[in-house]
Amino acid sequence: MATIDGNRLLADLKALRRFGATGTGVVRPTFSEVDMASRRWLVERMTEAGLDAGIDGVGNVIGRSRQPGPALLIGSHSDTQPRGGWLDGAMGVIYGIEVARALPDHAIDVASWADEEGTYWGFLGSGTFCGEDVEGCAPLDAAINSAGLAGVPKARAEDGRYRCYLEAHIEQGGVLEAENKKLGVVTHIVGMNGFDVTFTGQQNHAGTTPMGLRKDAGAAAIRFAHEVQTTMASVAGPHSVWTIGRIAFDPGAPSIIPGRAELYVQVRDIAPETLRRMEDHVRALVAAADRRGPCRAALSGGDDGVRPAAMDEDLQKHIAAAAERHAPGLWRKMPSGAGHDAQVLARRMPAAMLFVPSIQGISHDFAEDTHEADIVLGCQVLATAAESILAG
Ligand SMILES: [Zn+2]
């Protein structure tokens, strides 16, 4: 059985943390100077692990095995949120390198996908690898230029090279910790979509305008928000979530009836049909608000939502068996409420994910952390799963 080196794993994770370290967290947005330095460091680690490694034209770091395939591809992302934690993504990349080191005679490729967090374009690296190109995004082109990647070829998933994709990640929620579980075998990755909704009324004096004569865009937005909160459950599923995370009144002054209000509704679910019902429900509520008046209501966005992805069932079995072997009874199946590169890779090849617990469920924050024993256990489970997948 492949045995990982826990100390080597933790030492590399801590070394990667130094790129952009800020307090207990990390500030390492894609294409920043520290991000590019960390990518060059990852190339060195992958090369040491016996892989042919390089940075491609969108910033992906990819290490290719010289062993006969089809290969197992293991990856995640090493960029961070503007104020991020040290394990989000980074852990999965270092896991990949450690598993490749623990299984030197196996065909294991390792990847750090560029811009998962969407500093310029969410899932840029994994999407490009799977054949999707981003065009017409000037800030992205400028960032690629200044990172020195203009003209560098983009890596693409070659037909026939890969058997499947595995990604390990921190849970970023509190389910595992609350249930005293050490590992999560991911069944689905949530899909999501979001809409800007704008209400247009008539700005006016808050003291002299009688209630019956108002076209209060703020009141219309609040009524709509209430309808979303109270009626969405009728079309949603047991795992659905919906959020109005932003609302703004214009001009936003105590004695002015808002002439305009904007809010953002986001919906997420793991089932494509349920997600579509929720999207349709938002559209129907906006249309009804517009018909009702006296304010106009209009919706925009919703065209670039992310579809839910099911994880491969056979791969889930391999991961579950490895989890049961190393931590009997201390694992569970669970959906992922956060988006991950694995949902992009799943369009090209069978894909699966493993979660380890987040302390207090905190992520996208400097306080993000996981117990070292849990980090080491997760990597060992991934290595055992990788070995059984490649043997099967
Ligand atoms: Zn992540």
Image (tube, rainbow, N blue to C red):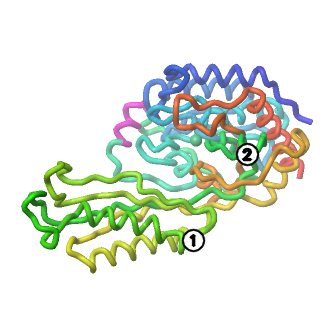
**Neighbours of disc 2 within 10 Å: few (<14), some (14-19), many (20+):** many
Q: Residue at x 22, y 63 (%)?
A: 217
N-terminal of the pair, mark 1 or mark 2, is 1
Q: Residue drawn at (91%, 42%), measured in percent from left and top?
A: 325
The residue shown at (43%, 29%) is 32
User: Marks 1/2: CA distance?
Assistant: 25 Å
For the residue pair 384 and 324, the one nearer the viewer reads as: 324
| Residue, disc 1 | 274
Disc sitting over residue 307 in the figure: none
Q: Position of residue 341 (x, y in %)?
A: 59, 48
Q: Quadrant of the N terminus?
A: top right
In this orientation, which residue lies closer to the viewer: 94 or 202? 202
Q: Quadrant of residue 286?
A: bottom left
* Residue denoted by label 2: 354
Q: Is residue 295 left or right of residue 187?
A: left
- Give yes or no for residue 120 being in the magenta stretch: no
Residue 180: % across, % down: 78, 41
Pick the residue in front: 171 or 2: 171
Seen in the image, is 33 located left or right of residue 39?
A: left
Choose top left, top right, bottom left or bottom right for residue 335. Answer: bottom right
Magenta residues, start to end:
140-148
Image side of residue 194 versus residue 139, left or right: right
Amino acid beneath label 1: Thr
Where residue 252 appears, x then y in whole percent? 20, 50
Q: Residue shown at 63%/51% (left/top)?
A: 342
Give the amino acid at mark 2: Leu
Q: Quadrant of residue 362?
A: top right
Q: Quadrant of ligand 1?
A: top right
